[in-house]
Image: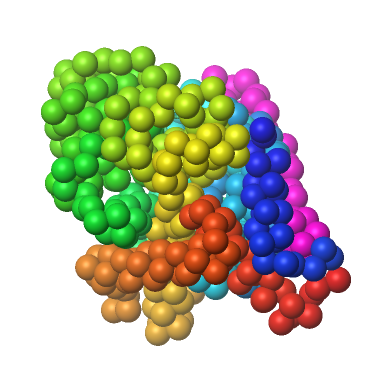
Amino acid sequence: MNALAATNRNFKLAARLLGLDSKLEKSLLIPFREIKVECTIPKDDGTLASFVGFRVQHDNARGPMKGGIRYHPEVDPDEVNALAQLMTWKTAVANIPYGGAKGGIGCDPGELSISELERLTRVFTQKIHDLIGVHTDVPAPDMGTNPQTMAWILDEYSKFHGYSPAVVTGKPTDLGGSLGRDAATGRGVLFATEALLHEHGKSIAGQRFVIQGFGNVGSWAAQLISENGGKVVAASDITGAVKNSKGLDIPSLLKHVKENRGVKGFHGGDPIDPSSILVEDCDILIPAALGGVINRENANDIKAKFIIEAANHPTDPEADEILAKKGVVILPDIFANSGGVTVSYFEWVQVFMYISANPFLLQSNLITFKGFMWDEEKVNHELKTYMTKGFKDVKAMCKTHNCDLRMGAFTLGVNRVARATVLRGWEA
Ligand SMILES: NC(=O)C1=CN([C@@H]2O[C@H](COP(=O)(O)OP(=O)(O)OC[C@H]3O[C@@H](n4cnc5c(N)ncnc54)[C@H](O)[C@@H]3O)[C@@H](O)[C@H]2O)C=CC1
Ligand SMILES: O=C(O)CCC(=O)C(=O)O
């Protein structure tokens, strides 16, 4: 099932459990705006290259639309649409005052030089600058993008609208980014996993983890899990996969990935076929790469007892059904990976605090006044508070609607957005 069909299906199931009015259901499903732009850049060798960029703004009933921008060859409009919708429910589950959006450019960032990536980002920003903004739609990093990408967007946007550090989050700390944002999605995955395991009378220590994807989210999750006594027995990325049943030495693997741009060739374990990573023996499986990877082809062979969805939409609905019958507990993406957008919200709030404390910044283009920025300990502490509360809220919905964690999270998110929509008088 494609990502959009799967996401719509989950939304409709939640709407039915909530008994939503059919007109309200329809208006919640239809995106606020879909943007598709052509981005042509000169390559370093002087030839021209054209790419297609997307931004889907799904819903803004609860606040400015929020979500990452992805650079990946498989970016397509349906997937961006699904990911934007997931952001709407995710920000509502986290109970932060945002709606949902997502963007992407169909490109392979590994094939582009830094200057080509900068030109592409600036052209994309030129094409969409009138439709994003501090109070309308606030991008952030996702697959294939990073704080540097956000810095280019900030700079290009500011040429049109004046210095606007709150127009993106996940930016470098030197430009007003929040401490802790880089690790936030992985740290949120840790807190979410702790909350789930606690309920099952378990803790991270001693559990065997398998992680697919070793980029921002996967590598931070691996690091924090191993620091908390968990054993990462296999990990993979686009370059390859490695396994060590005694537990991979994560600091050495992180060093290897940094030096070699991938997991491939790491000597602290045995190389395995990356396509078998999801069915490796473990207690807890963490998909942290692409969507749709857990499907009817492999669901029956999955050995994990718990799946923590660090990636967006890693599990197809058909796999959901198979895994439920096997008794596998799935912590859904719209809760499990909400740590990133939650700290993005903290970043946005911090930027407003220092701007209002020192309006001179807006004229000077310089951020020198850090008095109202939070230290990392505060960021992490607040994140834990939000993740713990989020888990409790999801569980309460599971009890009310007698449903699994995915529907608990969907009913929680959809209900909060529906209430905001009605309160604003937007229902049909
Ligand atoms: N960065 C963030 O704050 C958030 C990211 N996410 C989701 O987490 C997932 C990962 O995102 P990031 O870590 O930010 O991206 P990233 O670009 O930093 O890393 C992606 C990782 O996935 C690997 N990968 C790509 N294709 C693969 C394949 N076919 N098989 C195995 N590995 C593959 C890459 O080699 C890389 O290690 C995505 O689904 C993203 O939407 C969710 C919430 C927030
Ligand atoms: O930090 C953000 O604003 C968005 C992160 C994101 O794209 C996601 O949660 O999937």
Which image quadrant for residue 136?
Answer: bottom right
- How many circles with numbers are drawn on the protein? 0
Q: Is residue 316 visible?
A: no
Quarter of the image for the N terminus: give it.
top right
Residue 411 x %, y %: 60, 63
Q: Is residue 269 above or below residue 315?
A: above
Q: Residue at x 80, y 68 (%)?
A: 21
Which image quadrant for residue 327?
Answer: top left
Magenta stretch: includes residue 47:
yes
Q: Observer-nearest residue: 318 or 166?
A: 318
Q: Observer-nearest residue: 47 or 320?
A: 320
Q: Residue at x 19, y 38 (%)?
A: 231
Q: Residue at x 49, y 29 (%)?
A: 299
* Ligand 1 located in image quadrant: top left
Q: Which colouring convention does the figure follow?
A: rainbow
Q: Which residues are magenta?
A: 24-50
Residue 301 x %, y %: 43, 24
Residue 394 x %, y %: 47, 64
Residue 317 x %, y %: 60, 39
Quarter of the image for the C terminus: give it.
bottom right
Q: Is residue 344 above or below residue 355?
A: above
Q: Residue at x 38, y 25 (%)?
A: 279
Q: Is residue 191 left or right of residue 111?
A: left
Magenta stretch: includes residue 225:
no
Q: Observer-nearest residue: 40 or 262?
A: 262
Which image quadrant for residue 372?
Answer: bottom left
Q: Is residue 411 visible?
A: yes
